[in-house]
Image (cartoon, rainbow, N blue to C red):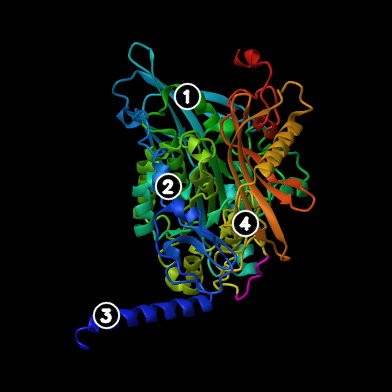
Amino acid sequence: MIAKYRAFIIAILCVKVLLISVWLFSKNGIMITPYSTNISSLNHQLYSPRSKIRAKSSLDSYFVYTKGCVIPRRDAFDASVLKYYSKPRSIRNCHANVPLTSQDGTMLYLDNRTISYCERQNIYRKPNSDFGYLEKDKQKFTDSVNISSKYIRVTCYDKSGKESYTNYHHFIQRNESRLLELDRRLKEHITANKPAEIMNVMMVMIDSTSRLNHIRHMPKTRQFLLKNMSAVDFEGYNKIADNTLPNLVGILTGNYLNEELTIRKTQRHGPFDKFNLIWKHFSAKGYTTMFSEDFPTIATFVYLSQGFLKQPCDHSNRPLALAMNSHWLWSKCLGNKSETELLLDSTYNFVKTYRNRPYFSLTTISRLTHDYLNHLANGDDHYLDFFTRLHKENLLNNTVVVFFSDHGHRLSSIVHSEIGQFESRMPMMYLMFPAWFSEKYPAIYQNLLDNRNKFTTNFDIHKTLKDILNFKGQPRLKVDVKLRGQSLFDPISGDRSCQTANLSMHWCVCKMDEIIPRDESLVKASVEFTMREINKEIQNYTMCMPRTLRNVTSFKRMKYTNQVNLTVTVIKLSIDSNPESALFHTTLKYNEITKQFQVVDSISRTNKYKHTADCVKLKHLRNYCYCKNQTSILQ
């Protein structure tokens, strides 16, 4: 009889054990979440970041799962993304061109078999200006030659005397008198601060690249970095502001842009020479510095701004970028290379030139990715080649590499989706250290690994850069969770939240505690408030048309508990407006008692205004203005 019902009895016992286990887990406050790749279902769950104990499998479903912040894991190839993801349109193959000139170090090599002669012309920075350049000292040559200038334009002529070839070259020239001064500073730094290591820093930024889009479009580069260079991939890295300038300023100064403008008594449009940029700290302690960018018309510090009066670093490519720009616009190639390759080559040459002394470099590359979500794929081979060369030649054996982006894509159609809003706030951030670092400093390296799945921001990168410069070899034993900038060498607290990190709820991706059903009267009131705020921005500019509502594309109402245990209502709102279907996204605080709204941080434009706002010069107003006289603008 017992044998007959043995299977049934065993099943009943298993169910009882399972029920008791669930009761024990829930009693101890452990959140049990089965692995799911269905992102849409994750988005509609209620998350409580207050759990005191983290389930072992939590990171299967979350990028960050801590007491202070929960960020659900997103699949880079989720079904909701596929309609935006595509093979990029073909870009001209520059490698098909046959170059007549090439360079190695300061040597310019010339293949003179098919030409009569060439001319080289030096390019100089215009005095006290980031705009314009000078071309001087034209010289004729017919053979390879050693170059003593920084930038040159080469023009060659065929046997009939017709111009047949143009190229540009950037040479990293050592300034020996400057190096003597830097050596003096380095000795003072070593004597006064006794750093445990002197490590170089090489920062490379790709514009408008979320971590997930990097996974989609640069698989070869990503795989090489993870496998060959032990890249630390920060999955919980959250931007602090909308576009490039404020996000980069956060990394370079440790301050928000408005704070740095106020502290340095600088106008919003610059010039930015007074900014306390991190490369100044490195230079003061003996490091050679470089700052290079492409796309010179919209470069970080010059778009609708004055840039720098003085060249900000020992090495810069700005005069060359300006000179190359018109040539690139019609040819898309410079010799046999793309603009991206040329900038990476300059960075490689800088690293190679200064491989035996301390350096800091920042290279930002925008043109390929700024306007097109899927064009990133066209850069995969370029970046793979760049990192492979540096790695194989052992040029990074004493260098910390920061490979990152300023933000995800802000202006393509993906940003109108929920995952697009998420990606725009979650740029890629990889840190790589020399092979010996993890064994020599295991406590620091373990913190780096642990912090991969902590909530981190631009301010933490700034603090980490300062710790590299003044490297002590030991992590801090205790870190105040309220410090908005925390070194990634130290353990980032699990208590860290949007509020303790001093990050606006408009940008912070940590999940709120609760999602509340839609209230149509509140939708109407919040939309009317937002439209009034937009029109306030342009009300004193008579050349701009007032905006009206076309459609509400998204509305979410949430609650969270702030640092003083008060419940705050938050609204996330996306709207489509007239004229010209301008799309906006904003975050509002709502006071349930007074029925008043407050804009959190800003109202973001999420599609391109192109030339429809050219009648205003102030950068932030272009997001809101639609010029009444479009005919004169087009002309």
Task: Give the distance between the C-alpha atoms of the residues marked 3 and 4, in whole angstroms.
Answer: 60 Å
Secondary structure under tag 3 reads helix
Residue 279 visible at all: no
Which tag, 3 or 1, sits closer to the chain's start?
Answer: 3
Q: Which label sits in the foreground, 1 or 2?
A: 2
Which tag, 1 or 2, sits closer to the chain's start?
Answer: 2
Question: What span is in magenta?
Answer: 477-482
Count of all numbered marks drawn on residues in the image: 4
Q: Which label sits in the foreground, 3 or 1?
A: 3
Q: Quadrant of residue 286?
A: bottom right
Which disc number belongs to residue 531? Answer: none
Secondary structure under tag 4 reads helix
* Closer-to-camera residue (48/13): 13
Which tag, 4 or 1, sits closer to the chain's start?
Answer: 1
Residue 481: in magenta span: yes
Q: Which residue is mark 4?
A: 459
Q: Position of residue 57 (x, y in %)?
A: 42, 68
Q: Which residue is mark 3?
A: 8
Which tag, 2 or 4, sits closer to the chain's start?
Answer: 2
Question: Residue at coordinates 44% horizontally, 52% vertically from top-left?
Answer: 39
What is the crowding at mark 1: few (fewer than 14 residues within 10 Å), some, or many (at least 20)?
Answer: few
Q: Amino acid at mark 2?
A: His
Task: Give the distance between the C-alpha atoms of the residues marked 3 and 2, in whole angstroms.
Answer: 52 Å
Q: Which residue is mark 2?
A: 214
Q: Position of residue 97 (x, y in %)?
A: 32, 27
Task: Give the distance between the C-alpha atoms of the residues marked 4 and 1, in whole angstroms.
Answer: 36 Å
Disc 3 vs disc 2: Cβ atoms closer than 8 Å? no
Which tag, 3 or 2, sits closer to the chain's start?
Answer: 3
* Closer-to-camera residue (409/303): 409
What is the crowding at mark 3: few (fewer than 14 residues within 10 Å), some, or many (at least 20)?
Answer: few
